[in-house]
Amino acid sequence: MKRLTLFSFAVILLSGCTHYVETEILSSGFVFESAQFPSCHASTVLETEDGLLAAWFGGSYESNPDVCIYCSSYCDGRWSEPALIADGVKSDFLRYPCWNPVLFRLASGSVALFYKVGPNPREWWGEYKISSDEGRTWSAAARLPEGMLGPIKNKPLAMPDGSVLYPTSVEYTPDCWRVFVERSEGDLSGWSRIAIDNNDFNAIQPTLFLHRGKLELLCRTQEGCLARAESYDCGMSWTPLQDSGLPNNNSGIDGLTLKSGFRLLVCNPLLKGRNKLSLLGSPDGVKWENLLTLEDQPEGEFSYPAIICRKDGTVDITYTYNRQRIKHVHLKVKEKYF
């Protein structure tokens, strides 16, 4: 992992004060340089007792039956060799590709790995595994309750009442996409689906923000923008999707809320292409400013980010790098008000 000291800052004007935000890249590098799979995509990352755990799907190419879920642990400044932790083998004669892993810390302290299995996004289903030793070993795969998909790309959100909200979506047809939220208890019991009025948007892969009881949702669309919705009752009901004013290239995003309430969003701020990837910030979930450009190249694919905040307040971002590697960036976000 390459150590860096790179700074970027943004000034956001708020009512009665100026909000100054500075980012400092602490390290940047690849989770692996080469691996047993030629193609990889859709990473997820989680803080562990010893460092970090990252996972992604890899194989010959997306949707090929040999695509499995791999993981790597980060400890003492080094990533371990990728290890296969889930596959879509159902019998000696039947095998499906795996898709979109999502790591999540359960209330029990165990780590859950959610992922999809199936021939394509229209027919896939949700499965999960549990690790009680920080990702070193995993349980056998279990299927989610009928009709439940689990988190479709981005991390779930643990709510103050002990429940868990899962940002999810379905692709009924290539031109009929819908976002919604699923809910369970902290022990993965009592699953239910919460509908959202998509308001004519073809939308998938939402990410969730929580601050002072208010929930916000941003999601990818086919309409050239990120759509947003809000909830004021712990996610049990939502406002209809609306245009957020942020451009979207029909590619995945991810975000989070810092302890201060400041929101972070990683996205491709483009209408077309995946050659630029940026970190945006917002004090209110409405007005966004660019904080840091992670990638900006004439061509290439830098996409499907995942972002988390560690207990020490620093931030980790992982993302697809040209479908060949997974890149990891560790940074600080410093806020000042004047």
Image: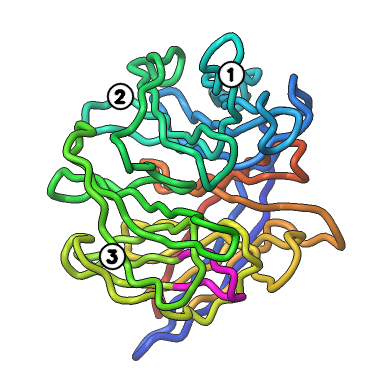
Residue 247, image quadrant: bottom right
Q: Amino acid at mark 3?
A: Leu
- Separation of disc 3 and disc 2 at Cα? 25 Å
Helix, strand or loop: magenta stretch? strand
Q: Which mark is residue 110?
A: 2
Residue topped by disc 3: 215
Left or right side of 303 for 233: left
Q: Tag 2: residue type?
A: Ser
Q: Residue at x 44, y 62 (%)?
A: 178
| Residue 46 relative to residue 296: left or right | left
Residue 214 percent across, percent down from the top left:
24, 68
Q: Amino acid at mark 1?
A: Leu
Callouts 3 and 2 close, C-beta under 8 Å: no
Q: Residues within 10 Å of mark 3 (few under 14, many from 20)?
A: some
Q: Earlier in the sequence, mark 3 or mark 1?
A: 1
Which residue extends farthest left? 161
| Label 3 residue SS | strand
Q: How far apart are the alpha carbons under marks 1 and 2?
A: 31 Å
Classify residue 22 by image quadrant.
bottom right
Q: Position of residue 11 (x, y in %)?
A: 53, 78
- The region drawn magenta spans 219-227
Among all residues in the image, which is located at the extreme right? 298
SS class, disc 2? loop
Task: Tell me, for residue 94, which label it has, or none.
Answer: 1
